Amino acid sequence: MKILIACEYSGLVRDAFIALGHDAMSCDLLPTDAPGPHYQGSVFDLNLKAFDLMVAHPPCTHLAVSGARYFAEKRADGRQQEALEFVRRLLDAPIAKIALENPISIISSQIRKPDQIIQPWQYGHGETKATCLWLKGLPKLTPTNIVAGREAKVHHMPPSADRWKLRSTTYQGIADAMANQWS
């Protein structure tokens, strides 16, 4: 399969699909953290019709309910509407199979409810971080390794220059489940 991992700089999901023999590439405005097929630029620069599957991780900065205290300002200056329009464009891409992931966010009230909400502890990581999946042409993910130790580590990270990056990285167990179950 030809697979696009949109809005991914880490290469984790991309590499999970490559490990299974798929032609996968990541795409992000940022350079990739891991060597491998990566397009640095807008996902909409690419010929999306060429892909069989897209897993998209749009930025949640202006969408996640964890930042609800800033919503009025973000609505007023247009950042939130721009972020929602980006999500709509991803979901409407001319690709038969699409998974879009984001934390609990206004996508649920402004576009549609997610098809599934998963947790890292269902995929081998003893943490809590509700992750919503909006699916097109794909089945829901099945948990692969339910573990104990359900801590909200990612929510309690101390401030740092790369906190945003650490909080947004996909857990390896979830990346592996996506690759194994959706290809």
Image (cartoon, helix red, strand yellow):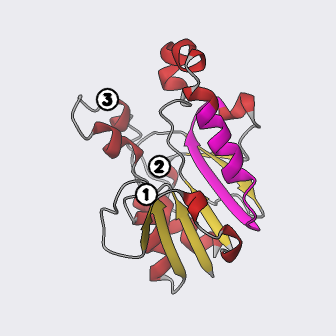
Residue shown at the point (34%, 63%) measured from the top left: 32
Label 1: element kind: loop
Is 180 drawn above or below residue 147 in the view shown?
A: below
Instruction: Indicate whether residue 145 is drawn in magenta.
Output: no
Q: Is residue 143 visible?
A: no
Residue 115 pos. (x, y %): 73, 47
Mark toward the start of the polypeptide (3 vs 1): 1
Around disc 2, counting alpha carbons within 10 Å, would you say few (fewer than 14), some (14 to 19), or many (20 or more)? many
31 vs 28, left or right, is: left
| Quarter of the figure that contains the N terminus | bottom right
In-image side of 151 versus 132 (left or right): left
Question: Which residue is rendered at x = 66% and y = 52% of the image?
Answer: 90
* Label placed on residue 120: 2
**In whole angstroms, how far apart are the C-alphas of marks 1 and 2?**
7 Å
Mark 3 crowd level (few <14, some 14–19, many ≥20, 10 Å Cα): few
Q: Which residues are magenta?
A: 82-106
Label for residue 124? 1
* Amino acid type, mark 1: Gly
Which numbered circle lies on residue 156?
Answer: 3
Please, what secondary structure does the residue beneath circle 3 have?
Answer: helix
Q: Earlier in the sequence, mark 3 or mark 2?
A: 2
Judge left or right: residue 61 versus residue 55: left
* Residue 161: percent from left, percent from top: 22, 36
Residue 116, percent from left and from top: 68, 47
Number of residues whose C-alpha sits closer than 10 Å to that of mark 1, classed few (under 14), some (14–19) or many (20 or more): some
Please say if 131 is above or below 99: above
Q: Nearer the viewer, mark 3 or mark 1?
A: 3
